Amino acid sequence: MLTVLFATRNRAALLRKVLDTFCELQSPNSGWKLVVVDNASTDGTSHVLASFRSRLPLQIVLEPTVGKNHALNAGLQVVEGDLTVLTDDDVFPRADWLVQLRKAAETHPDYSIFGGAIVPRWEIPPPPWLQWIDLGPIFTITPEWIKEGELPPAHVTLVQGPNMAIRTIIFRSGVRFDPFIGPSGSSYAMGSETEILLRLSRLGHRAWHVQNAVVAHFIREEQVNQGWILQRAVRYGRGWCRMAPNSKLWLGIPRHLFRDIPKQAARIVVAWALSRPDSLFRARWRLNYLRGEAIEAHVLARQRRTTAHLDLSIGEP
């Protein structure tokens, strides 16, 4: 048996369409269960979920603390079976998705992590300027060059949240998602699943790419917007700063930012002067990524100060 787990918050209309697709999934021979965590939704999410109780092997979990990783950790308490499949509430899986993941897990017993292919499902046709940038980190799409097979540790982050599976024994050992990273309100450090993948990789767990386990990630019209994408760059930079903190700091900021931010700002000026919109947009993306690093460095420094203060308080007579 396997369990599919995802969290949802205030996406009732889209959730209904997603769950309709889940009703068409082929069941693995060992069976499956679906756990959906309602993360403090205030729309009609609860009614949508209730309407699928008779159509899906569904268990609903309520998590009042806002934050994707808080919700996933709550859902992990009720997973069953030997494989936990993680996805998102805006993902449309191919009918044989679970069958392919189950097959891979049985065929490759020495691997603990499995990632499938993620293709875009556009709400509106993508504009030509999207070719200027890498769609992977922006829309969580897997690159086309990945083929079936082992993903070396350097590429473990190519396993992505909308389509990944981890052997349940890992979670039963006490491993949980980091609640300080991932979606939580409008301002956060990206990397909910990436952080746990890096952690598991450092512990020696191996990853396998399952080419035929395919899902489509819904790309909303509002996301096909340069402003939205540039804000995404800030969150992306925040996430990588938290996941790979730079020990070389000056005034609490990674030293390289004092060099890289002015350099990137200069590239923006040059691209603007030469009327190169592609170069200008890429430079703005990179500058926002660096800004994200600086923001998260401040957040981490504040957390360290708070922890140190608490430690001192505990030590007082």
Image (spheres, grey):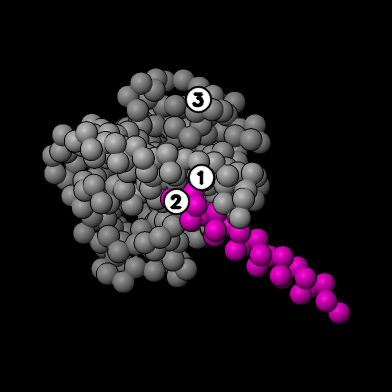
Q: Is residue 315 magenta?
A: yes
Q: Residues within 10 Å of mark 1 (few under 14, many from 20)?
A: some
Labels 2 & 1 near each other (Cβ < 8 A): no
Outermost right residue: 317
Q: Is residue 147 magenta?
A: no
Residue 170 appears in view: no
Q: Which secondary structure, mark 2?
A: helix
Q: Which residues are magenta?
A: 291-317
- Residue 163 rendering spot, x and y as whole percentages: 39, 39
- Residue of label 3: 151
- Residue 165 rendering spot, x and y as whole percentages: 47, 38
Callout 2 amino acid: Gly
| Image quadrant where one finds the C terminus | bottom right
The residue lying toward the viewer, choosing from 246 and 48, is 246
In primary-sequence order, the first of circles 1 and 3 is 3
Residue drawn at point x = 56 percent, y = 38 percent: 198
User: Comparing marks 2 and 3, which lies closer to the viewer?
Assistant: 2
